[in-house]
Image: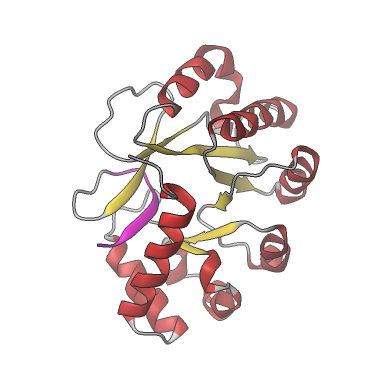
Amino acid sequence: MLYNSHSHFYDLNHCTIVNKSDDNVYIDSYFSIGIHPWNANKIEDNFFTVEHLAMNKKCLAIGEIGLDKLKGPDISIQKKVFESQVLLSEKLKLPVILHCVKSWNEISMIKQKLKPIQTWVYHGFNKVGILDEVIKTGLMISIGASIFTNLQLQNLLVKIPNNRLLLETDDANIDIYTIYEKVSEIKKIPLSELEVIIEENFNRIFINGKVA
């Protein structure tokens, strides 16, 4: 079985965490739930729904949540909503699926301020310029379809420790297997070895003895 840490599509063939919108209450797979930074101005309407759904045994993470300087309401509003959901992740002992667009400095400062215990997963990572900082901060790094086109990411993939690596498809309508294949090729390790690495990381971060 292959493991997909973040997808916008259902996939019956692999173990997938489906990103659910905050107003979608139909649950039939593992999922994450959160108020996306683009929708941060809707927190009063949606936070209760997020908290309620996050208590479902199939919810494995709070997300995707974070900050986005290119889209969404004012960054001050996004920060308030992000911090509220980080505190929720701590309360429910769920990891965070992190959305970060041109806002790593702000997110890093919030992490220092709140000192969360729960793991944060930097989803769709492709900003190679901050790779060392992200690793130092202790985040998991989830690689998606950008591995096919981002040559800098390909070149630096070997710098990501095996125990910090996850794979995802995000909103790309592709099979997670193709990402496994590409990462296996770049890291020059057998596909079977990569499968074990990702399975162990996925279970450690998202399952960790939880009955789901």
208 above or below 74? Answer: below
Image quarter where the C terminus lies is top left
- In the displayed structure image, the side of residue 201 where residue 37 appears, left or right: right
- Write the start and end of the magenta stretch as one range: 1-9
61 or 188, which is in the foreground?
Answer: 61
Residue 47 placement (x, y as % from top left):
53, 19
Which of the 4 image quadrants contains residue 194?
Answer: bottom left
Image quarter where the N terminus lies is bottom left
Residue under the point 28% across and 29% down: 27
- In the displayed structure image, the side of residue 21 where residue 161 appears, left or right: right
Residue 44 placement (x, y as % from top left):
57, 12
Q: Residue furthest top?
A: 45
- In the displayed structure image, the side of residue 4 where residue 126 appears, left or right: right
Which of the 4 image quadrants contains residue 76?
Answer: top right
Q: Which residue lies furthest to the left in this view?
A: 12
Residue under the point 30% across and 69% down: 178
Residue 132 placement (x, y as % from top left):
71, 68
Query: Is 145 in the magenta?
Result: no
129 above or below 41? Answer: below
